[in-house]
Amino acid sequence: MFENLTTRLSRVLDSIRGQGRLTEDQVNAAARELRMALLEADVALPVVKEFIDKVKVRALGAEILQSLTPGQQFLKVVQQELTETLGGNAEPLNLRQQPPAIILMAGLQGSGKTTSTGKLALWLKEREKKNVVVVSADVYRPAAIEQLRIVAGNVGVEWFPSEVGQQPVAIAQAALAHAKKQYADVLIVDTAGRTTVDEAMMKEIAELHAALNPVETLFVVDSMTGQDAAKTAKAFGDALPLTGVILTKVDGDSRGGAALSVRQVTGRPIKFLGVGEKSDRLEIFHPDRIANRIIGQGDVLGLIEETARKVDHEKAQKLAEKLKKNKGFDLADFREQMLQMQNMGSMQSILEKLPGGAQMQEQIKSVDAEKQIRRTVAIINSMTPQERRFPDLIKASRKRRIAAGAGVEVQQVNQLLRQYETTKDMMKKFAGGGMAKMMRSLAG
Ligand code: GDP
């Protein structure tokens, strides 16, 4: 995410050296480079101009701490201005509406509307403990209705049926009546998207808006389209009282122009980022944390939150108990740990949030780590329960059978057994706590 911009910025920041105050020449030179970097990232021109002007004024102003080097001073100014440009404070989702709180999803076709509807439903269900109903008012594409049905099934929320040929407003009203009857907390209405902004589409969604009076009207937009994302959002915002934006496909966006333009161009806050195809790849948008990521400082808070959330506390606790009772750490437990690591999300998303992680990513091929985990799990799967419980049983002929079963070489089975032994030793050292303890200390 935003790797190119981060790399460019770090070069600008590195170029400012020396001691004492920032000089005017230094500021001007850095501002020129910064301007280039932002334009290259496809940030909208008025946003770039305003950003640069503010950075200059602030960098030359008196509010800088003398204890910082010029490089640090400039970095601080850039961080503060990026945070402002991105919207200042995080704007949480507003659910303060007589239940069900209605969320209307708007956006162009292919922007990630249906995927985001599923992500939002999952987020509301798991994090906010809300009872969610979803419905599709896309009466042009039966495939879109079916897609939402599948997504809802996957994330375990109720899908209200609709059909091609019905009126969107009638669908929405029926879904609302149903949601009320079910005492649902939230109703999310997915809508039809066209390939471009057109009048008929605007009219239809405006009618839906008038009929539903949603507390949130979220515009879903593809971050890869750069500053065009902000332009489309503006066109929708002029026709519809948008309350926020979901920026999708940020995982594939190395530039960051959309993220940096949306707030300024539309005046509407970004509320969520879509950072992958899977339903759990949704992040709350925190301007200050994103600013830190852009300047290469990572997002350690985000990482800790994510880790604490993804670890299955119940399983970790069980393992801790088992170790405490001195029952021994066997290969089934080892497999469990591997699966938990996989749960934490891709190595890529972890790396991204580490300070300097954007650069590290290029060196470490995350796919390899994930492949390794999958292979380990496959090898353990092809063992018998007895072998998992008593790994000492695994001698040459058993190794050959296990290797064949998992489609690997005997050498790799040996490697896994060595890894397991090392981990077991480590577990003993973390007496009584193991992974659970480690995770708890991380989660603070
Ligand atoms: P809709 O037409 O607006 O409903 O768009 P869809 O929800 O069908 O999404 C279009 C495509 O974008 C699908 O292939 C999704 O898997 C993909 N997609 C959606 N959100 C994200 C995201 O945050 N990251 C990535 N990498 N892909 C996404």
Image (cartoon, rainbow, N blue to C red):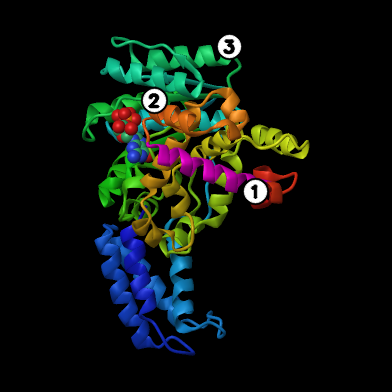
On the image, the x and y values in percent for residue 265 come to 34, 52
**Spatial distance from mark 1 to mark 3, Cα to Cα?**
56 Å
Mark 2 secondary-structure assignment? strand
Q: Specify the amino acid type for callout 3.
A: Lys
Respond yes or no on whether mark 2 lies under 8 Å from ligand 1.
yes
Tell me: residue 264, above or below residue 223. Answer: below
Residue 421: within the magenta?
yes
On the image, the x and y values in percent for residue 431 come to 74, 47
On the image, the x and y values in percent for residue 4 come to 31, 60
Asked if residue 241 shows in the view, the reply is no
Residue ID for mark 1: 425
Instruction: Judge the density around disc 3: few (<14), some (14-19), many (≥20) Cα neighbours within 10 Å.
Output: few
Q: Specify the amino acid type for callout 2.
A: Asp
Mark 1 / mark 3, whichever is N-terminal? 3
Mark 3 secondary-structure assignment? helix
Label for residue 181? 3
Tell me: residue 75, above or below residue 99. Answer: below
